[in-house]
Image (spheres, grey):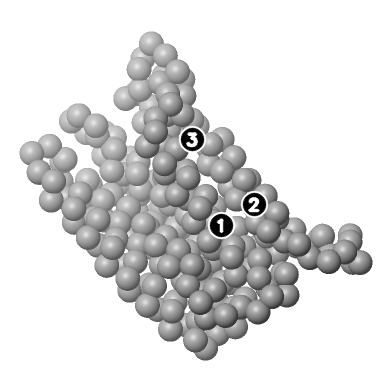
Amino acid sequence: MKRWAFLVAGLYLMILAALTVPVLWLAMGEQLSSDSPLREALGAFAEPGYWSWVAVMVLCQLALLSVPVRMASRRPVTRGALWPTVLVAGLMMGVLVMAAVLAIDEFVYRLEDTGDWLGWSGVATGLATWGIWAFVFGRAARTEAPRDLVTRQCRLLFRGSILELLIAVPTHIVARSRDYCCAGFMTFFGLTMGISVMLFAFGPALFFLFAERWRRLHPQQSDT
């Protein structure tokens, strides 16, 4: 079943790549080069930072799928096997909160002449949220069945991404109307994270669909 996990992660990567230019173009619009906005948007694919972010998200998707893979392969899910899922789900919750805080910061303050404290406040809040949710999911892992735990994590991540987008979208609209350098950058980060985590939350459900379909089509073949 590992190959289905890689397929899901690969689809996630392709969706992120496919959405990059449209989202960048729609969100940043007039800040792109007036001569060739499409070329400037495509320039994101040449940035190492962009691919680092994509790599982290894809690796986190694989970590979230580790428990579903064990379950689909009928392997025992030990407490140690749950930790990657717990940590990654907590991390995604932390990312959502950090993105929301940064979007609100840009909505309230102009990013000029504020120093670095705004950015660090978002990072600190995100790290604290990561720890809190990792603890919550870790406690739940002791009492809930593995499938129930993964389902609960994905449901909370999806709801959290919706809430974060409800913050990021209006704050981005306001920030883009302002006339300072790089207006809307932090709120654009909020949009990016909200969309990415929303798609991220569908990974296990998609994996289970693939696995069940495979079993129906190949009932005599052993799981791999």
Q: Mark 3 or 1, which is nearer the eye? A: 1
Residue drawn at (42%, 44%) of the image: 53
User: Residue type at mark 1?
Assistant: Leu
What is the three-letter code of the residue carrying label 2?
A: Phe
Q: Is residue 25 visible?
A: no
Res 96 quadrant in image: bottom left
Residue under label 2? 6
Residue placed under numbered mark 3 in the picture: 20
As drawn, is 181 to the left or to the right of 34? left
Secondary structure under tag 2 reads helix
> What secondary structure is marked by label 1?
helix
Residue 101, relative to residue 44: is it above or below?
A: below
Q: Residue sitting at 45 percent across and 18 percent down?
A: 39
**8 sits to left or right of 132:** right
| Viewer-proximal residue among 49 and 196 | 49
* Residue type marked 3: Thr
Measured along the vertical axis of the image, is residue 133 above or below residue 122?
A: below
Return the disc, 3 or 1, that comes first in the chain's sequence. Answer: 3
Q: Nearer the viewer, mark 2 or mark 3?
A: 2
Mark count: 3
Give the quarter of the figure containing the N terminus.
bottom right
**Image quarter for residue 68?**
bottom right
On-image quarter of the C terminus: bottom right
* Residue 182 image offset from top left, x and y in percent: 24, 32
Decide: few, some or many residues near mark 2? Use Cα within 10 Å; few <14, some 14-19, many ≥20.
some
Q: In the image, 149: left or right of 35?
A: right
Give the residue at mark 1: 62
**Residue 55 picture location, percent across and down:** 47, 45
Q: CA distance from mark 2 to mark 3?
A: 21 Å
Mark 2 and mark 3 residues within 8 Å of each other at the beta carbon: no
